[in-house]
Amino acid sequence: MTTNDAQIRDSDFKMVTLDDKAAEKIDTPKYSYWKSVARTFFANKVTIAMFVLMLVILLMAFIQPLFSGYNMMDVNNINDFGARYNWPNAKYWFGTDADGKSLFDAIWAGARTSISIGVVASLITTVIGVVVGAFWGNSKRFDRLMLEIYNVFSNVPTLLIIIVLSYTFGNGFWNLIFAMTVTTWLGTAYFIRVQVMLRRDREYNITSKTLGTPTKRMIFRNVLPYLTSVIVTQLSQLLPSFISYEVFLSFLGVGLSSNVPSLGRLISQYSPYMTSYPYLFWLPVLVLALITVSLYIVGQNLADASDPRTHM
């Protein structure tokens, strides 16, 4: 050893301890399902635009009527000819109608009713359909009974059932909700039943059943968590369809009371002015289109984002 070489001493060495937990640590990024859903969902610029549009519409529909105090039966300005049939301007953004009422206030009051009906009916249909469909797909005895019921109602047009029930029970918010949901959950339940049957005989479910796991636990722990994207897809399709049902029924004059504003009732009321005062007809139609399109696109993209296969 030359004089330039450093001498090795005992103090140059340090005793280290072995950490068993550190040795077993997996050096991979931490995975969070819902963070991954959010990251995938907001990665699409079109989705972000539709999501912002949907939020603006929802805020306007549920906040603006609280300040406007819109009353569909108010005719105080009917004799004020200066307030009637004003085209959209700085004072009346969407113009006024034959009674001098602001169309801007009327549209958002109607949107609140239409969206509320769509959301409530969709949630009721989805919850009942998912629960019944999950048990339907796991029980062969229950399957035979439900198939007979489904075959009867699936051959009758849904809209016809809703119209008949609406006339039978009369107009009203909850009567309309009942008419919409009394049979429509069957379609959701049948769809979930098929999805459950595709998964119930997989190895981990057969093993669970062999070990004595209760059916209820298997459904809610082994099956339904893997159907999140499927359920969201179904919900995104139900929302616009129920809003469309409400609009069509209100256009016919059934479903809601005459003093309850809705987009369907506005479209029906202002349809005679399609050529003379087109803004009265087309502005409610435009808002309706924006609501249904934004809800559908956001729902479909959320369903895609909630599918774990898109997180790879």
Image (cartoon, rainbow, N blue to C red):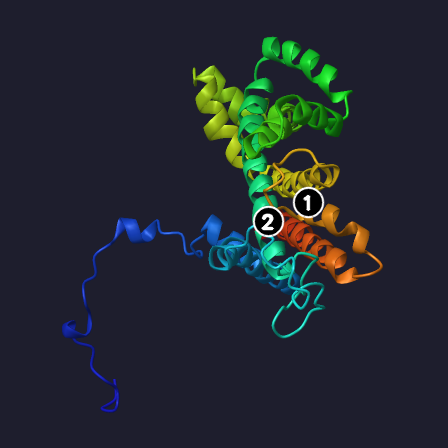
Q: Residue at x 36, y 52 (%)?
A: 25
User: Left of 46 or right of it: where is 116?
Assistant: left
Locate residue 311, reporting x and y percent.
Answer: 57, 52
Choose top left, top right, bottom left or bottom right for residue 89: bottom right
Locate residue 122, reporting x and y percent.
Answer: 59, 36
Q: Residues within 10 Å of mark 2 (few under 14, many from 20)?
A: some
Residue closest to the eye, 204 or 220: 220
Q: Look at the image and tell me in which quarter the N terminus lies.
A: bottom left
Eyeballing the image, is 236 above or below 50? Answer: above
Q: How many marks?
A: 2
Q: Which residue in the rendered view is the most extreme toward the right?
A: 275
Q: Residues within 10 Å of mark 1 (few under 14, many from 20)?
A: many
Q: CA distance from mark 1 to mark 2?
A: 10 Å
Q: Is the Cβ of the residue at disc 1 closer than 8 Å to that at disc 2? A: yes
| Residue type indicated by callout 1 | Arg
Which residue, given by chain and number where applicable, does mark 2 sit on? 72
Residue closest to the eye, 213 or 240: 240
User: Left of 61 or right of it: where is 97?
Assistant: right
The secondary element bearing badge 1 is classed as: helix
Q: Indicate which disc residue 200 carries.
A: none
Choose top left, top right, bottom left or bottom right for residue 213: top left
Which residue, given by chain and number where applicable, does mark 1 sit on? 265
Eyeballing the image, is 4 above or below 36? Answer: below
Q: Residue at x 58, y 35 (%)?
A: 121
Q: Which residue in the rendered view is the most extreme toward the bottom?
A: 4
Locate residue 126, reporting x and y percent.
Answer: 57, 32
Query: Is residue 18 something that shows in the picture?
Result: yes
User: Left of 249 or right of it: where is 5?
Assistant: left
